[in-house]
Amino acid sequence: MADGDLVLFGTSATKPHQADIVRWLAMMLWIANDRNYKRAWAYFKIGEKFKIPPPWHMNPEPMLPLPEVLSWERSRRIAYAKTMEKKKESA
């Protein structure tokens, strides 16, 4: 046993670093440009990922996304598709 802070399993006790948010936003902006999404999509996805309001004040240059970012974004598309499928079945 060791002394420490009690947190929910799978969560972090620290806030995300500003540099991480900017880097992820730049990669999400690249995805938005590549798929002809509006820029706002990237800002809302960053808010979803980091559990913060969309960081409208940030305006980084888009950069090629890392596999980690592509995987997370793909997981969100799959979750959305499953939700829409359930809604369609219940209607």
Image: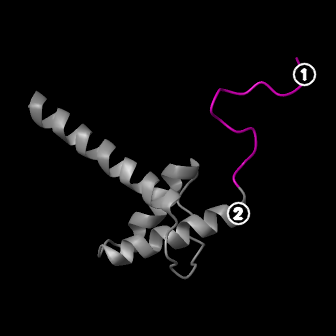
Q: Name the residue at 54% across, 73% down.
A: 26
| Residue 64 percent location from the top left of the image | 49, 76
Callout 1: SS? loop
Q: Is residue 51 magenta?
A: no
Q: Residue at x 50, y 79 (%)?
A: 62
Task: Identify which amino acid the numbered label 1 is placed on.
Answer: Ala
**Which residues make up the magenta segment?**
1-16
The kind of residue on which mark 2 rests is Gln
Which residue is outermost to the top? 1
- Please state the horizontal and vertical placement of residue 38, each as a whole percent of the image: 34, 72
For discs 1 and 2, the disc positioned in front in the rendered view = 1
Q: Which mark is drawn over residue 18? A: 2
Left/right placement of residue 90 relative to residue 42 reads left
Answer few, some or many: residues within 10 Å of disc 1's Cα (few below 14, many 20 plus, some between 14 and 19): few
Q: Tell me the number on the disc at residue 2.
A: 1
Mark toward the start of the polypeptide (1 vs 2): 1
